[in-house]
Image (cartoon, grey):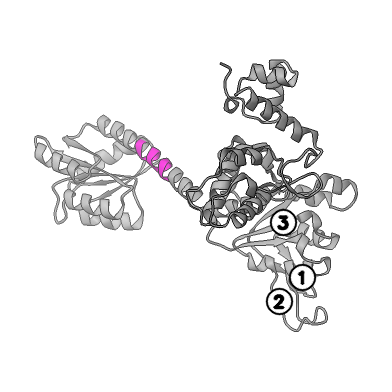
Amino acid sequence: MAQILVVDDEPRMCEVVSRALKKRGHDVRTASDGSDALSKLAEAAADLIFTDQRMEPMDGMELLQKVNAEYPATKVVMMTAYGEVEHAVAAMKAGAAHYLNKPVDLEEVQLLAERLLATQSTERENRQLRQVLDRQTADWELIGESVALKELQALILRVAPTDATVLIRGESGTGKELTAKAIHKNSARSKGPFVAVNCAAIPDSLLESELFGYAKGAFTGADRDKLGLFSLANHGTIFLDEIGEANGGVQSKLLRVLEERKFIPVGGHKEIEVELRILAATHRNLEDDIDEGRFREDLFYRFNVFPMDLPPLRARSEDIVPLVAEFLNQLGRAGESLDRASLEKMRLYPWPGNVRELRNIVERAHILAGPAPIGIEHIQLPDGRGRRGGLGDEPADLNIENHERRLIRLALDRANGNKTQAAKLLGLTRRALYSRMERLEIPIDAAGEDS
């Protein structure tokens, strides 16, 4: 149902047009001239206006100009006397969406209203999409073009507008806090505070008072009341990183906060209520912690409303190039790129420390190179014994899947992307190679086509 305003100094015309539009289910108001119309718009906006051109004291052209200036999303249809072509042309040039000749055809009025409203709906959706994309472009810190990252970005944009609790899971260095920030920035709470706390970095004895605050006299040294991080995050978002490290007492309090958004500070008696969103992250397998009695099962299900699994860097090696470019830019090497040998060396490394490790390697190379261009000799990757250097003969880790992915990429490189030849090098059938590439999330198309 749309909000429509019919403006004419002839009451009979207002009544006839209004009745025709109401038959289509629209909410229709009327006004006797331009001034009256502006008063009605000040009370409640309209999606569409049908207005006569000749009225006193404010005519349709002046009303059109004011509506365009003050209510740009509202479409205006000008109704002109039959034969006044020059007035109709002037109205269209001034920004009218359409014009109708009087006496108007009521069926034409109905059809025109439906068409303009449909167009308006599409324009509104496009504006909203542009706003989302603008926010994404301005605030996005998750860099890359891989399918895995694009899927993650799509999930973020889907869950961000809701108030759902999100559990972000992934290895260290995969960008769990960046993901939480992206959810916050693309949410209705973006203007509120974003408070991040690493539960693993705060001693067990202090975590409860840091999160929930404490009352004066709660313990030795508590000489005043202190607000906790939950209070500081009110009307915003709190991000609990490494939630698996929280002790049993904190877990019990967190369960109540998740259920009721209420808690009592340490040593306090008065209940505090907060209105915020809770995001959590962990690199641990919480299901194993539940089996071993280290994590509450009921708390896990409260956190796990919307789980998000972050891909490790080794599963999106195509993102190494844009990530390196961004890190070089941040280090003052804008426009500089690494040579092919350096990038290949990085692409074949399994990155157990993920994006955080990649950034450290690039920064170290920047320091070693000094003012000179960064070369392969400056890319110092750890070998299997933790020393810096090349990949070496001993692998950096013993994960079979990591090396399976690496061998497939090496074979594809040696075969120049020819998957039939790569399968022969690996001792596989072409179908078996495709199956493994799909399981390991190696883009088949990106690997090249057989010639």
Q: Quadrant of the C terminus?
A: top right
Taking depth in this image into account, of 191 and 432 the one nearest to the observer is 432
Q: How many marks?
A: 3
**Magenta stretch, overall SS:** helix
Residue named by callout 1: 209
Which x, y percent locates residue 329?
52, 53
Give residue 83's quadrant in the image.
Answer: top left
Q: Is residue 403 above or below residue 160?
A: above
What distance separates the C-alpha of mark 2 from that of mark 3?
22 Å
What distance separates the C-alpha of mark 3 from that of mark 1?
17 Å
Sooner in the amino-acid sequence: mark 2 or mark 3:
2
Q: Mark 1 and 2 residues: CB-CB less than 8 Å, in contact? A: yes
* Res 241 label: 3
Name which residue type carries label 2: Lys
Determine the secondary structure under disc 2: loop
Which x, y percent locates residue 274?
66, 64
Name which residue type carries label 3: Asp
Q: Is residue 432 left or right of residue 418?
A: right
Name which residue type carries label 1: Ser
Q: Is residue 28 above or below residue 248?
A: above
Give residue 153's quadrant in the image.
Answer: top right
Mark 2 or 3, closer to the camera? 3
Q: Residue at x 44, y 45 (%)?
A: 128
Task: Please indicate, yes or no, whether residue 157 appears anywhere in the rendered image.
Answer: no
Residue named by callout 2: 226
Which x, y percent locates residue 310?
68, 43
Task: Please indicate, yes or no, whether residue 161 appears anywhere in the rendered image.
Answer: yes
Query: Magenta span covers which residues?
Result: 119-127
Determine the secondary structure under disc 1: helix
Q: Is residue 350 left or right of residue 61?
A: right
Sooner in the amino-acid sequence: mark 3 or mark 1:
1
